[in-house]
Image (tube, rainbow, N blue to C red):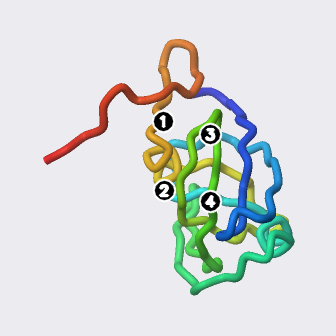
Amino acid sequence: MGHSYVSLTIYDKTLSRSRKVSLLVDTGSTYSWIRKDVLEGLGLAAEGKWRFKTIEGREIEREIGEAVVEYEGLRATTIVVFALEEDAQALGVYTLEGLRLEVDPISERLKRAEVVLAI
């Protein structure tokens, strides 16, 4: 997929506060990366730290937490990485799957998955 961006809404866990963000769709990223100040502005707190390997092969540590996200009427709870200023903001695969979305390779747009994988 080329450099495609989508606009989605991020909520706090109680759905009382929200913010729209534009994220790069990145099927190479497991989790969604959203600026720390945006997440903290919604009252979301980090729940731990995880290690990540960057595209350059560097290992970094970032805080993680949970948020509710919504895209075109689809809503899901997802893991988010508290991205620093130098980090890109991205929509990762875990969030895409939680929203039951997939990337259409022809149009390079997101579309609803007709079915999800099972055992």
SS at badge 4: strand
The residue to which callout 4 is attached is 68
SS at badge 3: strand
Q: Are marks 1 and 4 in contact (CB under 8 Å)?
A: no
Q: From the image, state whether disc 2 or disc 1 is nearer to you.
A: 1
Using the image, determine if residue 29 lies above or below residue 113.
below
User: What is the x, y in percent for residue 63?
Assistant: 64, 80
> Farthest residue toward the top?
106
User: What is the x, y in percent for residue 14?
Assistant: 68, 69
* Local crowd size for mark 3, using a 10 Å CA cut-off: few (<14), some (14–19), many (≥20): many
**CA gap, disc 1 and disc 4:** 15 Å
Residue sitting at x 78%, y 43%: 22
Compare marks 1 and 4 and give the one earlier in the sequence.
Answer: 4
Q: Are marks 2 and 3 in contact (CB under 8 Å)?
A: no
Residue sitting at x 71%, y 43%: 8
**CA gap, disc 4 and disc 3:** 17 Å
Compare marks 1 and 3 and give the one earlier in the sequence.
Answer: 3
**Amino acid type of the residue that numbered disc 3 sits on in the rendered structure:** Val
Using the image, determine if residue 107 lies above or below residue 114.
above
Compare marks 2 and 1 and give the one earlier in the sequence.
Answer: 2
**Numbered marks: total:** 4
User: What is the x, y in percent for residue 93?
Assistant: 48, 48
**Amino acid type of the residue that numbered disc 4 sits on in the rendered structure:** Val
**Amino acid type of the residue that numbered disc 1 sits on in the rendered structure:** Leu
